[in-house]
Image: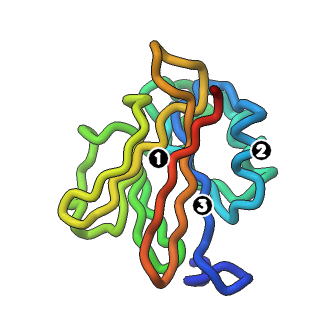
Amino acid sequence: MLPAVAPGGGPVRIGVISDTHGLLRPEAVARLAGVERILHAGDIGRPEVIEALRRIAPVDAIRGNVDTGAWAAAYPESLTVVIGGRRIHLVHALEWLRIDPASMDAVVSGHSHKPGIAMPGGILHLNPGSAGPRRFRLPVTLAILEAGEAGLHAVIHQLLA
């Protein structure tokens, strides 16, 4: 388990990305620079995406509905991690959630390509949106999540104008 605070004493900065569909944009790489951990909420698309993300920071990833083939079997359908003392559950689609969200500090999902931050029941629900190929007129986004003693704070960042 990582310490509750970053090496500098503050919260842990986590890059949260989803629905790359095989495309890791340079804008995403630039935005993730300096994070201490990366969470990928599925629809990775190609194993090279995770390899590139690991050059930035340690990665926890799950598979989504487009992640098929032998390489995808290495990734679970859901995963709970503890970062900065906070329990964060990753599931690609919220309808696949099989745990009680009240047992978590945050639930991270993707699938819809619609970025969003909500706090139902005081639990952070974060969808970083899609950082891969643009879908319909939805923005291309990812999120930065800070986790530490003071709680969780998420910001969604648009990657393309």
Give amino acid for label 1: Pro
Q: Residue furthest top?
A: 136
**C-alpha separation, residue under disc 1 versus residue under disc 2:** 27 Å
The count of marks equals 3
Q: Is residue 10 above or below residue 50?
A: below
Q: Nearer the viewer, mark 1 or mark 3?
A: 3
Residue found at x 65% / y 25%? 22
Residue 18 position in % (x across, y down): 52, 38
Residue 78 can be seen, yes or no: no
Give amino acid for label 2: Ala
Residue found at x 70% / y 50%? 32
In the image, taking residue 102 as reference, residue 146 lies left or right, namely right
**C-alpha separation, residue under disc 2 versus residue under disc 3:** 14 Å
Circle on res. 76: 1
Circles 1, 2 touching at the beta carbon (< 8 Å): no
Q: Earlier in the sequence, mark 1 or mark 3?
A: 3
Residue found at x 46% / y 16%? 137
Near-viewer residue (151 or 51): 151
Residue 64 position in % (x across, y down): 45, 33
Give amino acid for label 3: Ile
**C-alpha separation, residue under disc 1 versus residue under disc 3:** 20 Å
In the image, taking residue 87 as reference, residue 34 lies left or right, namely right
In the image, taking residue 38 as reference, residue 135 lies left or right, namely left
The residue pinned by badge 3 equals: 14
Mark 1 Cα-neighbour bin, 10 Å: few <14, some 14–19, many ≥20: some
In the image, taking residue 66 as reference, residue 124 lies left or right, namely left
Near-viewer residue (85 or 158): 158
The residue pinned by badge 2 equals: 30
Residue 159 position in % (x across, y down): 64, 34
Residue 143 position in % (x across, y down): 54, 48
Q: Is residue 150 above or below residue 55?
A: below
Secondary structure beneath dot 3 equals strand
